[in-house]
Image (tube, rainbow, N blue to C red):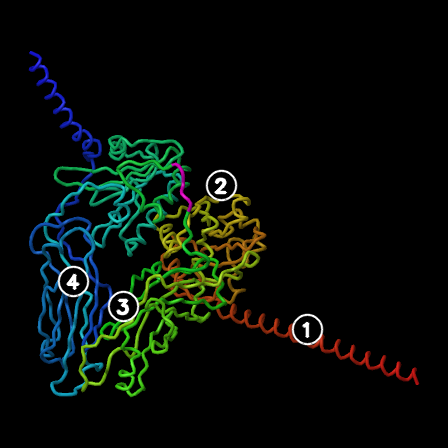
Amino acid sequence: MKQFQLLIACLICIIIVAISPMKSEASTTISVKGLKMTAAEKTDYPQPITNTPITLNGPAGEVTFYYNLVSDVEGKSSNLVLNTENSELLIAPSSISVSIDNKMTKSIALNGDKPLRQMTIPLKGDALKEGTHAVTVKYYGVLKEGICVKQGTSANWLTLNINSYYQLNGLVKNSKMTLGDYPSKFVGSEDKSVYVVIPENASISTLNSALQIVSFLGNQSGKVSTVQIKRESDLNEINGNILFVGLASEFSNANIVRLWQDANIKQSANALNLAIRTLKQDKRQVSALFVTANTAADLEKRVSILTNLQFSNQLGGVDLSVKNLPKKQQTTQNGSATLKQFGVENLTLDSQGVNSSHYYYYAPVNTQLNKASTLSLKLKKSETITSLKEQVELKNDTNVELIVNVNNIPHSVNLRELADSKDGIYTVTVPIDAKAMKDNRLIDLQFQTTGLAVNDPCKSSDEKRWVYIDKESAFTFPVLQDNEAQTGYTFAAFPYPFINNDNTPMIVLPQKKDVPDEQLLNLYHALSKGNQQSNLQLKTADQVTVADVEEEDVIFIGGPNVQPLLQKKVNDLTISYKGEIAELSEEGFVSEAVEQFSWIQKNPWSKDNHSILVIDQQKDKPAYLDEELVNQLANSDEKATIIVQTSNKQFFTNADNVEANEYMNSKTKDSEGNQSISLWWIVAFAGLLLLIGILLWWIKRKK
């Protein structure tokens, strides 16, 4: 009897253990009702490998690009398809070879008779595993047979066209997603956007939080259109991974309210509450990230957990409540930034790969723009670069040079003159021209080499001369001191000063008019470039006060007629108004032809060096934040303080006036300096005459 009871007890324990995971799984899986799901388990869509043509120059050239799989792929007929065009002068044994993850996969012959061709490379095995994969395309081109024939001419080339792509056909394994998969699995694609869904009547704080998340995810994807914001009433179907942002009590759509209820999210007070759930309908399923808090203010205060990679990379599990906001790490230390922060890994340039990719970085906000920066390079090089034998071979007339292009301004390093290495590493300090630094602090960095290849066709060698650039090489930027401040911002500096690590820039919405979410998102995208993404405040004209703006950099959407604060300072604004009409003719523009305009000036409420930017319209039209105008603000490199857009979509600025004023101010300062010097000479000369007079008087008296 006791044995029978023991057996029954064991069976009950086994059943409980077996059921427990099912309960856990059920709690994170939600059946979708009332909303259509179109997300399929199969993927059958091409993904482009490049958005610009890539040209490889002969006789030998190569390029590496990457594709990323968020899950393992099963099935057949997954391919990499290269559409190429080559010189019509090529002859055998010209070829193109492709390797995937350093495994040679396929080679084909090239000739000039067929300049256009399509090369299909099957993807299989490890090439379909989850993760990032490297595809290397190597080109070898021959123009003419014979001895001592120079092959490296401008006629020897092959181009990878933009219609090259990889295509996945088959099942994607469904792996259980966690918060650790954010943001990588919520960035969308050109064919399948990710939706960030907010309540129909979202509070300003909720809207601000969602816009910052959408902007961040769009920047992570590289294509801002792949992540979209939607009000709950506009969500007609779910076609991929999705985010719901806001308080559960703010949502009113019955179908979405049911999702929140079934999600059963753990709520903690004074915290950002995150939960990953699987949404399922028939055989279709996607992942949903629920982002919420007890109050909209708590949500807004902690949204940087999802918009700062330092924080988001630390997330994990399926449920998480974050109460304490971590301290932000400085992106630069003492005004310096390593090449790793530019996105540069350890880089090797050689006789076949003489040019690096372009790398981009935003210098810190406190960079002093009128002073030179320095780049401290840590280099290794092949010993044959400086060997006496090689110099004799090259008749001493060929230098080996590393060229550092900063915003297309070259800076030279003679590799033959490097000396005093430590453990084989040479440290070289390269002064960077102050003129290379743009007002918006964007740095476009590229490395090139010359002289690594022997161009004498009569000399064949398997020597591979190279130079290695360590990713710990670093830029050092001149920084403004505590008693200094950057003054006189123009649109050339945009998005500065409205992205700032020290303060929280503010956007003020207008009275009377609604600004569509998509238009606001255009502005958020423009304000979240590169590594300098700031937290933003969003307020309405009705709620903002002088105390709110006097210590901030502020963007006003709309002029004095819809912004009460601006109306009270109308006499201190750069643009004067007559009633509701801006007097743009006073600034040199045909006022009647202007449709929209914007200007930047010193913050009239601030005693410090803060700025305001105003975006207004001369004619009543639906859009304050026209996409073309916002793009012009974001991409302008003119030192202008006023930009106008005419009804025929042309843009004009006051850049000439600004530069003329700067020139006149500098001449005035020079003149004042010269006058000061002249005055001192006059005083000194008068003093000298007085001294001579006293001496003569004293001598005469002695006599």
Q: Nearer the viewer, mark 2 or mark 3?
A: 3
Q: Which residues are magenta?
A: 323-327
Classify the position of the C terminus by image quarter.
Answer: bottom right
Looking at numbered disc 2 in the image, what kind of residue is underneath it? Gln
Residue 388 shown left or right of residue 438 in the figure: left
Please determine whether, in this image, residue 460 is positioned above or below residue 542: below
Asked which secondary structure carries label 2, the reply is: loop
Density class for disc 3 (Cα within 10 Å; few <14, some 14-19, many ≥20) is some
Identify the amino acid type marked 4: Asn
Q: Are marks 1 and 3 in contact (CB under 8 Å)?
A: no
SS class, disc 3: strand
Q: Residue type at mark 1?
A: Ser
Whether label 2 touches label 1, CB < 8 Å: no
Q: Nearer the viewer, residue 89 or 63?
A: 63
Circle nearer the N terminus (2, 3): 3
Give the residue at mark 3.
348
Residue 676, label in figure:
1
**Residue 587 vs residue 432, the one in the foreground:** 432
Q: Where is residue 198 shown, x and y percent of the image? A: 32, 40
Separation of disc 2 and disc 3 at Cα? 56 Å
Upstream in sequence: badge 1 or badge 3: 3
508 within the magenta span: no
